[in-house]
Image: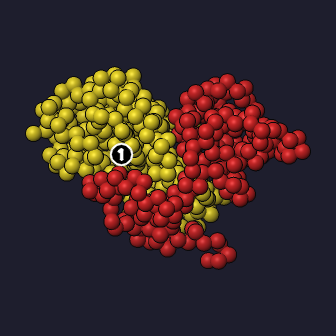
Amino acid sequence: MNPPKAALKLWSADNRIVLAEQDRFLARDIQRLSGTNLNRCYHCRSCGNACPFIRGMDYPPNAIIRLVQYGLRRQALESHTIWICVGCHTCSVQCPMGIDIAAIMATLRRLALEEGAMIAETNILDFHREVLHSIKQYGRAHKLGIMLRYKARVHQWFADLDVGLRMLAKRKMDLKASRVQAIDEITRLFIPHWKR
Amino acid sequence: MSDPSLHLTDLSYFPGCSLESSARESNISLMEAAGILGLNLIELEDWNCCGSSSANILDKEIAFSLAVRNLSLAPAHRPLMAMCPRCLYHLREAHQRLAREPETLRAQERRWGRPISLDLKIIHFLEVLVRLGPARLHQGLVRNLNGLKFVPYYGCTLFRPPSLRQGTYYQGELGNVLTMLGGEPLTRALTHRCCGSFLSAARADVVTPLVNEILASAVAVGAECLVTSCAMCQLNLEIRCTWDPRLPVFHFSEILALALGAEDYEGWFTRHLVDPRPLLAARKLIA
């Protein structure tokens, strides 16, 4: 999972706009699902200027809006950008047109998962899965458990080993998870209603 | 400005997963400071994770229900106080959705078998301090911070997301409170730059330059340390910084409790990855 090389892939060959592949309803759908009006965007790039994570992204935030406006569904859903975005809302605050760009990113992530799109940042997704697993099991996030399971999943035992050991030495990671007593109230949330 | 319906003696307290484990020093010092200020923090009985970024990304409905379970556990007659900005955000967002969607509120009340109050106040600790007023802080001041030069680091979440921006604005108060206790805030650093959040675990290569940038900005304005309102920021700023020498990063509650005369600070500061004790000793704040 290396960071994408080119900061802007908009002009590369595999991003040619094939008219027949355009999804004319994408912009409308994203607008309704995210509750923000992306037609107001005039591509001033304030969002990208402010974004702390721009270096890890393949498209700057306004280019994601452009992809949506052009109806380029696959490119938008398979971008690194939507997974690198942590939802810090810096772009939403900077946007002179008051577009909640973070909400657009969240909506695209949701669609990507629901539609089974190719996920560009599998490590990040794996991490989220482990956090949710911990919550399902204990009702709370157990950091050591999350990190161990995550490392096993991505086979990177030695990355960050020093940080992990220092955190253990400082007792920043508890061996035993803090648990919710009424755990069945939590686990029930994870079972579809017709199975309960 | 004071809201007569808000009594600030008994407060429900939502610690959240970070303050329960990796940032326990923040939890302990918060309790200490609250005790000195005459606040009675009653931990929310059997609380669970607020929903977190991860649950919100993977399954919004599960995340929403997780947040609502906490709301259903909170007694309506006292405000629910959170220390972690992200928890505050998720709890408030869920509360706002319940107010918008009466059918969802009823469904959630049936799910948990407990009433959920739409009048419940969900507030951050900083807001509690501001409402208490400067007099109470002055009264409790034991150790003057002696002009300790700090950067008030808010991180990205406190007061920034749209759903937190409704109502009174408490931006800047972290610096104000500590100024009152004798500190010297340096606000021209990157005080609201995001720390990298969960990317710290999966994409450290993206987070490290970011954290270095934040710390470099603090060094550039002549700061001796950073004081942060968010437990996750504190951790990220400590573990992802590759700069030398490193600036200590304090939890806001630690500095507050220290100024208010707490004595068991040794246990908190030994849990830091960047030892803050030399700085505090040089400033004659600790022995």
Name the one closer to the observer, B113 or B165. Answer: B165
Image coloring type:
by chain
Relative image position of residue B71 (x, y in whole percent) = 49, 57
Pick out the residue farthest to the right: A20
Q: Is residue B185 visible?
A: no
Q: Amino acid at mark 1?
A: Ile
For chain A, the rendered hue is: red
Quadrant for the N terminus of chain B, please: top left
Name the one closer to the observer, A73 or A107. Answer: A73
Name the one closer to the observer, B209 or A26. Answer: B209
> Who's the residue at 73% across and 57% down the image?
A115
Q: Local crowd at mark 1 within 10 Å, few (<14), some, or many (≥20)?
A: many
> Who's the residue at 29% across and 26% down the image?
B223
**Residue marked by disc 1:** B239
Chain in yellow colour: B
> Who's the residue at 64% across and 50% down the image?
A120
Task: Tell me the chain of label 1.
Answer: B
Quadrant for the C terminus of chain B, please: top left
Residue B260 to residue A148: above or below = above
Relative image position of residue B61 (x, y in whole percent) = 61, 59
The answer to which quarter of the image holds residue A104 is: top right
A34 sits left or right of B139 in the view:
right
Relative image position of residue A13 (x, y in whole percent) = 77, 38
